[in-house]
Each structure stands twice: as structure tokens, then as C-alpha cells.
Image: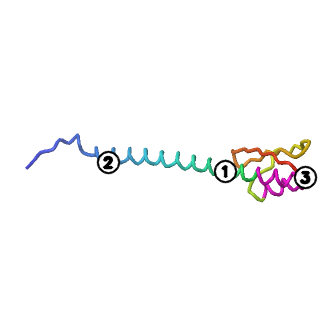
């Protein structure tokens, strides 16, 4: 019969728990990064739509399009020949400019 030292008992369990913690942390980081990219893309889409709508229909139309794209119209500035808008989706912020010509 082979005699194994008692100090090795449970070593595999500790390694498995450590691996689970590391993999969970990586998965959480990847999820947050993906969410951030998704929010930035949604914010830019909403800003583009709001700017185009605002150039033709004013602030109310820009706000309507931003809301329809799940964003918040943060700023609406009328320029000489168009508008500039800033919208936010969660922590992501995007701006766009459009002309009425």
C-alpha cells in the first residue's frame, strides 16, 4: 500500500476554486466591455438619428428620435445651417451634426 502525505489533501479543491474565481472575473470584465461597446454604438446611432430629425424638425423631433432609440437628448444646438446634438445611453455619450440643406 502506498502512503501519501496528509498535507496534499485538498490541494486540488483550492486550485479549482482559484480557477473559478479567475474565470468568473474574466467573464465579468468581458461582459462589461461588451456592454460598453454596445452602449457606445447605440448612442452614436441615436445621435445620428436625432441630428437628422432635429435639422428638419427642431428640438422636439430630435428628442423624440433620441427617446425612440433608447437614449437621452443631452444637448441641442442650432447652428447657422443645421444642428449639433449630444445624446447619452447609460454612461456612453455621442454627438452628431446635421444640416438642413
How far is mark 1 from mark 2, CA to CA?
A: 42 Å
Q: Position of residue 48 (x, y in %)?
A: 76, 51
How crowded is the residue under tag 3: few (<14 C-alpha within 10 Å), some, or many (20+)?
some
Which residue is identified by label 1? 41
Magenta-highlighted stretch: main secondary structure?
Answer: helix
- Pick whichever of labels 1 and 2 is earlier in the sequence: 2
Residue depicted at 74% across the width and 47% down the height: 88
Asked if disc 1 and disc 2 are in contact, CB closer than 8 Å, the reply is no
Q: Position of residue 92 (x, y in %)?
A: 69, 45
Residue depicted at 75% across the width and 53% down the height: 46
Kindly give the residue lying farthest to the front in the view shown: 101
Which residue is identified by label 3? 58
Q: Position of residue 13 (x, y in %)?
A: 32, 48
In-image side of 92 versus 77 (left or right): left
Q: Position of residue 97 (x, y in %)?
A: 81, 45
Q: Is residue 63 magenta?
A: yes
Mark identifier at residue 13: 2
Magenta part of the chain: 47-67
* Foreground tag (3 vs 2): 3
How far is mark 3 from mark 2, CA to CA?
A: 63 Å
Amino acid at each position: 500500500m502506498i502512503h501519501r502525505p496528509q498535507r496534499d489533501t485538498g490541494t486540488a479543491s483550492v486550485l479549482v476554486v482559484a480557477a473559478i474565481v479567475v474565470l468568473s472575473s474574466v467573464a465579468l470584465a468581458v461582459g462589461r466591455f461588451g456592454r460598453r461597446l454596445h452602449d457606445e454604438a447605440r448612442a452614436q446611432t441615436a445621435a445620428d438619428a436625432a441630428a437628422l430629425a432635429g435639422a428638419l424638425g427642431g428640438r422636439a423631433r430630435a428628442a423624440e428620435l433620441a427617446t425612440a432609440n433608447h437614449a437621452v437628448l443631452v444637448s441641442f444646438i442650432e447652428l447657422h445651417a443645421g444642428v449639433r446634438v449630444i445624446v447619452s445611453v447609460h454612461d456612453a455619450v455621442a454627438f452628431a451634426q446635421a444640416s438642413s440643406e
